[in-house]
Image: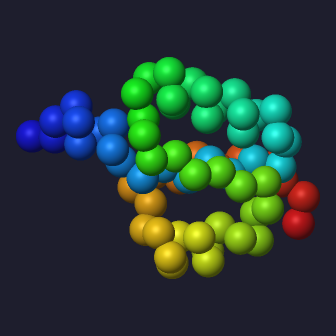
Amino acid sequence: MVSTSDLLHARVLIVDDREVNVVLLERMLAGAGYVSVTSTTVPGSVCELHRKNPYDLILLDLQMPG
């Protein structure tokens, strides 16, 4: 069984080309108690970020330029 602490320490990556959406999600996750949240507005950086830091969850905007 996964504990609440394990969930709140999950590594989360937010990917969105709109900064306002990134900030909103960061604040929502922080307010919920998540402590390991990374974000980017550059979709091309996702693979490299994930190689360096295997995320447990990636929140990805599917309609981004490029």
Image spot of residue 49 (x, y percent):
59, 70
Q: How many marks?
A: 0
Q: Image quadrant of residue 20?
A: top right
Image spot of residue 65 (x, y percent):
90, 58
- The answer to whether residue 62 shows anywhere in this view is no
In which quadrant of the rendered image does the C terminus lie?
bottom right
Q: Is residue 25 above or below residue 46?
A: above
- The answer to whether residue 50 shows anywhere in this view is yes
Image spot of residue 57 (x, y percent):
45, 51
Q: Image quadrant of residue 42?
A: bottom right
Instruction: Report the colour scheme.
Output: rainbow
Name the side, left or right, on which 5 lies relative to 25.
Answer: left
Q: Residue furthest left?
A: 1
Residue for point 61% across, 77% down: 48
Image spot of residue 45 (x, y percent):
71, 70
Residue for point 69% across, 28% down: 24
Name the side, left or right, on which 8 lies relative to 43.
Answer: left
Q: Nearer the viewer, residue 16 or 65?
A: 16
In which quadrant of the rendered image does the N terminus lie?
top left
Residue for point 63% across, 32% down: 25
Name the side, left or right, on which 57 lies relative to 6.
Answer: right
Residue for point 61% across, 34% down: 26
Name the side, left or right, on which 38 lies relative to 40.
Answer: left
Q: Residue furthest right?
A: 65
